[in-house]
Amino acid sequence: MGRLISIASGKGGTGKTTTAANLSIALGKMGYKVCAVDADLTMANLSLVMGIDDAYTTIHDVLAGRADINDAIYATAYENVHVIPAAIDWEHVIRADPRRLPETIKPLKGKFDFVIIDSPAGLQMDAMNAMLSGEEVLLVTNPEISCLTDTMKVGMVLRKAGLAVLGFVLNRYGRSDNDIPPDVAEEVMEIPLLAVIPEDPPVREATLEGVPVVEYKPNSPGAKAFMELAERITRIAGFKARVMR
Ligand SMILES: Nc1ncnc2c1ncn2[C@@H]1O[C@H](COP(=O)(O)OP(=O)(O)OP(=O)(O)O)[C@@H](O)[C@H]1O
């Protein structure tokens, strides 16, 4: 059976989508079957980052009762990685019922090794429905105190709701001289720190190019940190190490 992992954060713009995309592709490179789900129903950024930007059947169609989930699963250019895209127009957004996200996404567990769910930031209803589609959560924060505490709150709420909190990613480390150091961040969060992703220009360039950094510049510090995160996740998930390709 696969693992359903929600990617969540207390604040917007921390690097959730970047983490979801790079983690998915890194796991795919390791030989795991991955489905990346764009459950950020109003932004649809994951779909764009994964190279899907046209009139596909989307998660919105499924949530509106107009399509089957199996018709919304698309192969990507990345080995072993499929994506369920979101629509980017308002007409689709208002028809989709976000409360159906968990019942829609959970059955994917039987089809993939990992289902990676990109969720909206915060604790609003749309975000809750997206995050509760997972059984485990990986939190993404930046090294600022308000971002850490807001993200910790999200973790606490999800734990109470029954999700297992895997730990957190400290992203964009080194962007400012005032960054909270990793050991202090781990004390504040009171959950395991799974990866420190440095502030790295190729990560941003890769987003602009529409190709996640683990493919765009695999030897950059940011890409290497995302690959290490994927290895860590497979160890936590109890999967046997597979040969890196
Ligand atoms: N480690 C990094 N180094 C440099 N730039 C980064 C890094 N991580 C993310 N970024 C950039 O920050 C921007 C925001 O990232 P991203 O879209 O992943 O955030 P998000 O949390 O998903 O945002 P939202 O809440 O809007 O969905 C993107 O342009 C991305 O390329």
Image (cartoon, grey):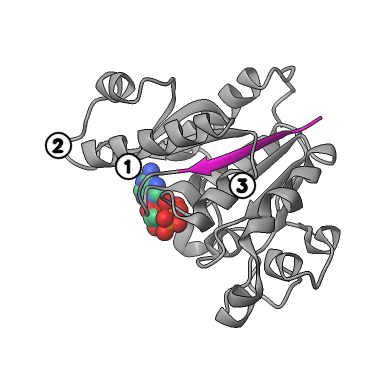
Q: Main secondary structure of the magenta part?
A: strand
Vertical arrangement, residue 227 with respect to residue 18, above or below: above
The amino acid type found where label 1 is placed reads Glu
The front one of 73 and 61 is 61
CA–CA distance in space, label 3 to label 2: 32 Å
Say whether residue 90 is left or right of residue 239: left
Q: Position of residue 175 (x, y in %)?
A: 24, 42
Which mark, residue 117? 3
What label sits on residue 177 in the rendered view?
2
Q: Which residue is identified by label 1?
A: 199
Q: Quick check: is the Cβ at mark 1 less than 8 Å away from ligand 1?
A: yes
Name the spot of residue 192 as percent of width and height, x first.
44, 20
> Quick check: is the Cβ at mark 3 less than 8 Å away from ligand 1?
no
Of helix, strand and loop, which one carries label 3?
A: strand
Tag nearer the camera, 3 or 2: 3
Residue extending farthest to the left is: 178
Please indicate whether residue 239 sits to the left or right of residue 91 in the image. right
Q: Please name the amino acid that badge 3 sits on.
A: Ile
Residue 67 location, quadrant:
bottom right
Marks 3 and 1, how far apart at CA: 23 Å
Q: Where's residue 130, x and y in %?
A: 58, 51
